[in-house]
Image (cartoon, grey):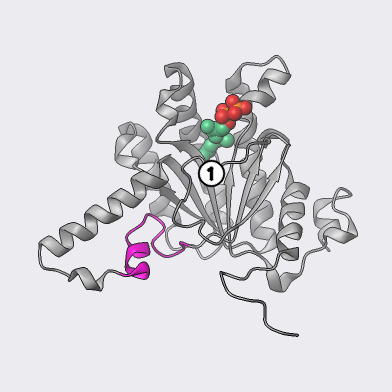
Amino acid sequence: MLTKLFGTKSTASQILDPNNIPHHVAIIMDGNGRWAKRRGLPRAMGHRAGADVLKKIARAADKIGIKVLTVYGFSTENWKRPETEVSFLMNLIGEYLRKNVQEMHANGVRIRFIGDIAGLNEGLQTIIRDAEALTADNKGLILQLAINYGGRDEIVRAAKSLARAVAKGQMQVDDIDESVFAENLYTYDCSNVDLLIRPSDDYRISNFLLWQLAYAEFWFTPLHWPDFDESTLVEAVAAYQKRERRFGGLVSEE
Ligand code: FPP
C-alpha cells in the first residue's frame, strides 16, 4: 500500500505499522542554503525549493496518519540574517499561505502558527490570522508553522503568564504543575512531540520546542531539506517504529 503511495523508493522493509504512527512529528527544515550553494544558486532559491517540499511533506504526513506536523520556518534568532534574506523569507511565508491555503482547507488541514506573531509585519499577521480562522474547524492534519519562534522565549512567556495569574490571585503557586505549564505554551493542546526530524547533517535542537521534545525520538539525515521527499518521511517513521520508548521507565518483562 505504502509502496504504491510513495512509488518505488519505499521498499517493503519500510512498510509502516498503522498502529504505531507517531502522533506529533516536528521537523527542522535545515539545509536550504547549502542545497542552493551546491547548485550555484542564490540562497533564496533554496528556501523556495524548501517551501515546495513542505507542501509535499504535509500531504504525505496526512496520508501516513500523522496528526500533528510542526515545522520550524523562522526562529527568533533568524533576524540576525541579512535583511534581504529575512524579507525574502517573510514574503515566501506569505506567498506560501496565499497559494496553498484553499487547497489545504479543502483537504481538512488545520493551519496554526506558533511563535511571536505580533512581531511580524502587519500584512503577514493578517494572512496568518485569516489562514488560522479559515481552517480552525478542520479535523484533518494540524500543520503548525513555527515563525518567529524560540523555545526559550515560549517558556519565558508561559512563566510570565502564570506569574501574572498568581499575582492577580487567579491561581495559587501550588496549582502550577507540568500539565498547567504545558497549557500555557503555544502548543497548549498538542505539546508532546513523538518524532523530531532534522535533515542536513546538523545534530542540535536550535531552540526548537525545548519543552515539547522531552521524550521525542530524534532522527537525522544528511539530505538537505529541499532533497527530502515522501520516501524520506517514510524512512524516518519506519526508524521511529523500531525504537523502544521507555519514558524513563523500564521495558515490561516478556
Ligand atoms: C534553514 O536552512 C531554513 C530556514 C531558516 C527557513 C526555512 C524556510 C522554508 C523551508 C521556507 C518555507 C517556510 C514556510 C513556513 C512556508 P538554512 O537557511 O539555515 O540552510 P543552511 O544551514 O544550509 O544555510
Residue 47 visible within the image: no
Task: Tell me where the magenta segment starts and ends, as one range.
Answer: 177-191
Q: Which residue is mark 1?
A: 205
Residue 163 visible within the image: yes
- Judge left or right: residue 244 versus residue 211: right
Residue at 60% from the left image edge and 35% from the top image edge: 30
Tell me residue 24's x, y (percent).
Answer: 56, 60
Residue projecting furthest to the left: 168
52 above or below 246?
above
Tell me residue 86's x, y (percent).
Answer: 45, 24
Quadrant in which residue 109 is drawn: bottom right
Tell me residue 101's x, y (percent).
Answer: 51, 46
Residue 71 magenta-drawn?
no
Residue at 20% from the left image edge and 68% from the top image edge: 173
Residue projecting furthest to the bottom: 254
Residue closer to the observer: 109 or 248: 248
- Judge left or right: residue 150 versus residue 5: left
Q: Quadrant of ligand 1?
A: top right
207 above or below 86?
below
Residue 185 magenta-drawn?
yes
Secondary structure under tag 1 reads loop
Residue closer to the observer: 131 or 162: 162
Q: Amino acid at mark 1?
A: Ile
